[in-house]
Image: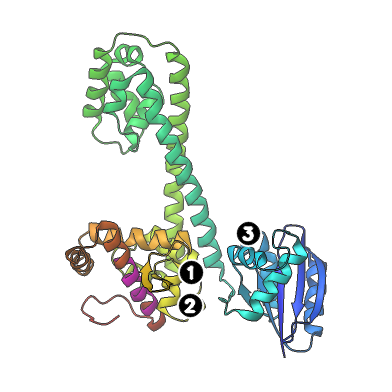
Amino acid sequence: MRICVGIDAAKTTHWAVAFDDGGTVVLDRAVENDPGGLDDLVAALRALDGEVVVGIDVVGSFARFLEATLLAGGFALVHTPGLAVNRAGQGFAGGERKSDPRDARTIAELVRTRDLRPILPDADTVVALRLKVGRRRDLTADQTRRLTRLRGLPCGIFPGLERGLDVTCKGPLVLLTRFVTPAEIRRAGKARLIAHLKKTPHLHGLDALVDRALEAARAQKIVVPGEAATAELIRDLALEALDARTKIARIDRELEDLLADHPDGALIRSLPGMGAVLAAEFIACVGDIRRFASADALASSAGLAPVQRQSGKRNGWRRAVGGDKALKRVSYQSAFCAVATRDPLSKAFYARKRREGKHHTQALIALARRRVTVLWTMLQRRETFDPNRKAA
């Protein structure tokens, strides 16, 4: 007999519900998120007569301790996506109501009626990659907002300088940590500006950068109200941006080291367009490739497989809007990199799709879908990418 268990995971108290094959509730209880509470749950599940399959709606994050305990107990674990739980709950009586016991029942019903993707134990390297990738994603998102602000503030008080500096580069940021207003740059002169920049190693094109700043400063004589306060804020943002660049570079080096220790790292990076960061993000999203029974399952998880849309006499296909957004972004960006770096096979496939009438985005999505099949096959066969091989 198969016992289907649904656990609504939470930070302090989980709720577990179990059904047998006939839909009879055999377990319905709260579970404290501590060693004692989870040990009691494992004992209760082992006491049930049948093959136990446990579904949870959260993977990682605060549910990592719950996952580790259940996997150590030898139970089969599957993932019930939160969106599926919400949609399924609306189909039951009183669908607008929400509670932990109700969500746990819905998860158990999904485990009983649907074929869900398994959750497999992760190695320490995969967990470390996932944490580093998440931290890098946060830093880059903050950096993007910071640089956008760094473009907007100088434009209000010193538009000539804003046009002459590229704040995505290190040199302009170093300049903005001290010299911002036209008067400051004019008073400093070329020698002091270059001396300030040379305090930071590995900067290039200093003469051209200083010349652009001085030219813009000499062209503006007016002092804008609030200039001093704005300049102080710009200096703070420039210092923060430089610090973020250092942190991101350190994480990139750590990702390189972790990929060298992961058995799939070299395989994934052999595919053109998959650099260290994208390879790390792919492993962080996918985990163990055995979770995906086929390349189609992996493409569906990434939201790259077309979705049928049929109603009455109308029948066609449309682009999927669901799927793992992070995995979709990795697949799309790697396809873009492969075309941009002029990989012959990717370039030829992209050109063929454009000749068929597809626009740029459609051709890149088609290429990303094809590359998912290649990646899955490489990982299944444990073979590096071979451009001379016709079939994936």
Q: Is residue 12 above or below residue 272?
A: above
- Tag 1: residue type? Val
Measure how far apart labels 1 and 2 are at the Cα level: 9 Å
Q: Name the residue at the bottom extreme.
A: 1
Q: Are marks 1 and 2 in contact (CB under 8 Å)?
A: yes
Q: Residue at x 44, y 66 (%)?
A: 302
In this rendering, the count of numbered labels is 3
Q: Report crowding for label 2: few under 14, some 14 to 19, many 20 or more residues within 10 A (C-alpha).
A: some
Magenta span: helix, strand or loop, mainly? Answer: helix
Q: Residue at x 66, y 64 (%)?
A: 90
For disc 2, the marked residue is: 292
Q: Is residue 240 above or below residue 155?
A: below
* Circle 1 SS class: helix
Q: Which mark is residue 286?
A: 1
| Residue 351 shows up from this direction | yes
Magenta-highlighted residues: 367-377
- Tag 2: residue type? Phe
